[in-house]
C-alpha cells in the first residue's frame, strides 16, 4: 500500500502535540500507522502515513469532523500532501 507525507503549519505547537487523540481518530480511517516529525525551528510538522487507502484518505480529509479536529489542533492550511511514487526508489 501507499505511503503519504503531509506537511502543514501549526498555530500552537503545545496544543497540536496534545491533540494526538484527534489525529488517531482521523488517521485510523485510512492508514495503518503514522509517525510525526516536528520542524526544528518553526511551528511546522510533517506526518508520515503508512499503508494509506487513497480513496478513504480523500473522503476523510474532506469530512466535517476532520475540519473540526484540524481547528481544535490549530492546524493551519494549506496542508501539503505528498504521495509515494510507485517504483520511485
Image (cartoon, rainbow, N blue to C red):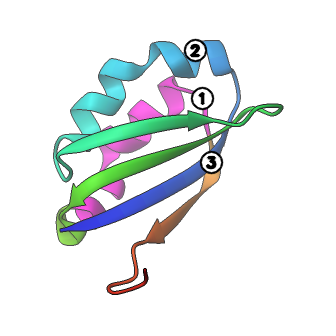
25 sits left or right of 61 in the view: left
Question: Foreground residue, 43 or 33?
Answer: 33
Mark 2 lies on residue: 15
Pick whichever of labels 2 and 3 is earlier in the sequence.
3
Question: Foreground residue, 89 or 17?
Answer: 89
Q: Secondary structure at mark 3?
A: strand
- Label 1 and label 2: CA atoms lie apart by 7 Å
Q: Which mark is residue 74?
A: 1
- Label 2 and label 3: CA atoms lie apart by 15 Å
Q: Secondary structure at mark 1?
A: loop
Q: Which mark is residue 66?
A: none
Residue lying at 27% horizontally and 53% vertically, measured from the top left: 50
- Answer whether labels 1 and 2 touch (C-beta < 8 Å): yes
- Residue 10 placed where, x, y %? 66, 33
Residue lying at 43% horizontally and 19% vertically, measured from the top left: 19
Question: Foreground residue, 49 or 71?
Answer: 49
- Label 1 and label 3: CA atoms lie apart by 10 Å
31 sits left or right of 66 in the view: left
Region of the chain picked out in magenta, as a range: 57-75
Q: Which mark is residue 8?
A: 3
Residue lying at 66% horizontally and 21% vertically, measured from the top left: 13
Amino acid at each position: 500500500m501507499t505511503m503519504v507525507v503531509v506537511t502543514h503549519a501549526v498555530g500552537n505547537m503545545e496544543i497540536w502535540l496534545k491533540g494526538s487523540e484527534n489525529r488517531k481518530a482521523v488517521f485510523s480511517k485510512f492508514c495503518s500507522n503514522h509517525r510525526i516529525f516536528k520542524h526544528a525551528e518553526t511551528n511546522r510538522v510533517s506526518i508520515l502515513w503508512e499503508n494509506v487507502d487513497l480513496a478513504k484518505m480523500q473522503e476523510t480529509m474532506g469530512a466535517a469532523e476532520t475540519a473540526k479536529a484540524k481547528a481544535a489542533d490549530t492546524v493551519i492550511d494549506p496542508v501539503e500532501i505528498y504521495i509515494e511514487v510507485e517504483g520511485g526508489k
